[in-house]
Amino acid sequence: MKAILALAGLLLCGLGAPAAAQSVRFPSVAVGTVAPGPELSGWLYQPSGEGPFPAIVLAHPCNGVSGHTHGWGQLLASWGYVVLAPDSFEPRGEKNVCGRGRVVSGQMRVADVAGALDWLNAQPFVRKNDIGLIGHSHGGWTTMRAVQGIFGLTERGLRAAVAYYPSCSPQFDRNVSLPLLILIGDRDDWTPAENCRRLQAAGFADPALVEAVYYPDAHHSFDAFVGDRTITVADGKSHRLAYDPVAARDAEARTRAFFDRHLKQ
C-alpha cells in the first residue's frame, strides 16, 4: 500500500523527470518486418546498489512520457530493476497520439523496444538477457506486439512482459512467445476487455504463457491517481478514465510478483 501511495503521489503531482532519472540516447533497430525509427531518447532509472540488476523496458501511453511514466520508472527501480523508458513520440515529431494511435503504431514501437533491449544488454550494471517489458494503453498495445514470436525478442533477452489495459487483437496477437500478464478493467471503454477475451477464446499458440486478469469495476487508466473524468480525443470519441484503488493495488502486487518470478529467480 505504501508503494501505491508513493506512486499515486508522483502521478498526482504530474512531476517532470525526477532527479534520479538520467537521459540517454540509443537507436531504434529493425526487427522482423518493422523498420527502424529515428534515434531515440529515453529515461533511465537505476536502483541503489552496485548491481548488475535485471532490467525492464517501460513503454509509455498515448500521451507520451509524463508523470505516469516517471512514477512507474521510480517504482520499478525501487523494486530492484534498471528501467529504461524510451520516448517513442518526440523523435518522430509527435507529443500525443491519443485518438490517432496509428500515427506511431504499437507495431512501429517494437523497433524501439528492440533498441532498448540491445542498449540495456550492453550496460555493465544490467544482468544480460534478464529483461522485462511493461506498457500501459498504447504502450500495452506495443507490449502485445513485442511478445509475438515473429519479432524474436526473446533472442534479445526479453523474458517476461506485462500489458496494462492493452489493445488486443485475435488476428495478430496469438503467437505469444514468452510469459505475458494482461491486466485490464471490464468497464474499459477505450481498449475493451472483450477484445482480450476474444483473443483468449481464439487460442494462444502456447496458452500456458499467458495470464489475463479482468477487474470487474475498473475503467481505463485504473492505476493513475487522477480524478474520475471523461476525455475526448483526436478522433472525437470520449472515454472515461478513473483510478481504482482495489484494481491498482492488486495489479501492482501481481506485476511485482510476476517480474520477480521471471527475472530474479
Image: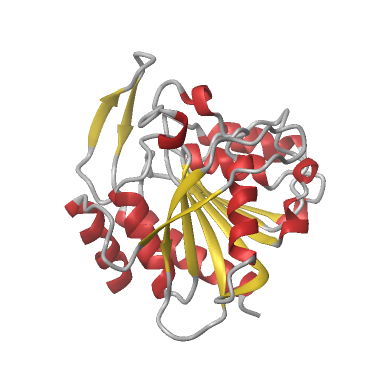
In this rendering, the answer to whether 36 lies above or below 97 is: below
Give residue 108's quadrant in the image: top right
**Coordinates of residue 93 in the picture (x, y in percent):** 41, 28
In this rendering, the answer to whether 165 lies above or below 260 is: above
The number of callouts visible is: 0
Q: Give whichever of 17, 251 is nearer the camera.
A: 17
Q: Which quadrant holds the C terminus?
A: bottom right
Q: Is residue 41 left or right of residue 229?
A: right
**Coordinates of residue 232 in the picture (x, y in percent):** 29, 21
Tell me the residue at 69%/48% (across/down). Answer: 147
Q: Is residue 214 left or right of residue 11?
A: right
Tell me the residue at 68%/32% (across/down). Answer: 35
Q: Is residue 253 left or right of residue 179?
A: left
**Coordinates of residue 250 in the picture (x, y in percent):** 42, 62
Give residue 229's quadrant in the image: top left
Q: Residue furthest right?
A: 205
Residue 1 visible within the image: no
Q: Give whichever of 70, 166 is nearer the camera.
A: 70
